[in-house]
Image (cartoon, rainbow, N blue to C red):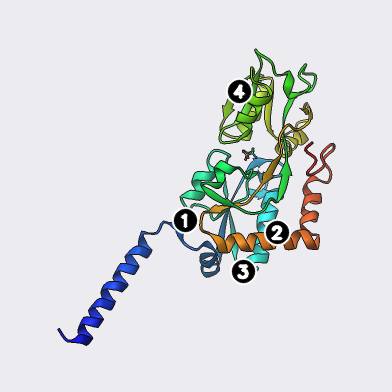
Amino acid sequence: MKKSKLLTLITLIMATALLAVGCGKSVADKNISTRVEEEKSITWGVKSDLRLVGLLNIKDNKLEGFEVDLAKALTKRMYGDDVKVNFVPVTSNTRMALLKNGNIDALVATMTILPERKKVVDFSDSYFTAGQTIIVKKGSKITNPQELVAGTKVIGLQGSNSVQNIKKVAPLSQVLELPDAAQAFSALQSGQADAMTSDNVMLYGLVSDNPNYQLAGKPFTTEEYGIAVNKGQKDILNKINKTLAAMKKDGSYNKLLLKWFGQIPGFKVGDVQ
Ligand code: GLU
């Protein structure tokens, strides 16, 4: 075989091998930031059953809330106006898998930055500080989480760290785990438990709409929320962190906080002690 032909053949084999490696990559492994710029579309995972944070408004079938607005604002500032923003509703239990299998590009879904989660996904800098507590029906004899003694029941969300945290504060209470906030709250309303535990910001969303329920006791944890992306997605993560910092600096982040939480009696953002 002539030298030039041999070279062509080697080049061809190498190109095919590279292509095969490329095709073998899972969706979640590709550079999300480049893909967003090329396809002019990004998909965020958000909560959809939590007033204030992320709620599907059945009047117009649109998602609304602090995290929804934050995702929109970040997209606009990171990629410009012509990138389409898609939302996929997630629960505490489904969010990790949906991110890992590439159904979504990034999660902004009340997700606490935890060491065990950091082994699986990467987090942005914290964008919100919450704290866990409980809600009870008004008139309940339970006035704080420590009063959830033997014989009581408390509802938590599957996939949420609150189901472990409540056991440290109320070790003898029976913890019932339900798939999402809507089901958890309706179980509480139907009298199937004495309390429901979650992050205060989520609980404020529930009680703001249901005046017969109230928060009971001060938060017993500190939850730093991070935006999660798949491991190795340094480009989008850097963009998110830079943009978050810029939004905090120019006041637009504060405007979002005020828009969603400014009118909630008793709730001061970041006040978890
Ligand atoms: N922020 C906590 C967590 O990430 C509880 C709320 C939630 O599950 O979204 O586990």
Label 2 to label 3: alpha-carbon separation:
20 Å
Asked whether, in this view, residue 103 is left or right of residue 226, the answer is left
Sequence-first tag of 2 and 3: 3
- Across and down, in percent, residue 169 comes to 69, 24
Identify residue type, mark 3. Asp
Marks 2 and 1 in Cβ contact (< 8 Å): no
Residue highlighted by disc 2 = 244
Badge 1: few (under 14), some or many (20 or more) residues near its Cα, within 10 Å? many
Label 2 to label 1: alpha-carbon separation:
23 Å
Seen in the picture, residue 2 relative to 160 is either above or below; the reply is: below
Sequence-first tag of 2 and 1: 1
Identify residue type, mark 2. Leu
Residue highlighted by disc 1 = 28
Q: Residue at x 21, y 81 (%)?
A: 6
Marks 3 and 4 in Cβ contact (< 8 Å): no
> In the structure shown, which secondary structural element does the residue marked by tag 4 occupy?
strand
Badge 2: few (under 14), some or many (20 or more) residues near its Cα, within 10 Å? many
Asked whether, in this view, residue 103 is left or right of residue 204, the answer is left
Residue highlighted by disc 4 = 175
Q: Residue at x 62, y 62 (%)?
A: 238
Badge 3: few (under 14), some or many (20 or more) residues near its Cα, within 10 Å? few
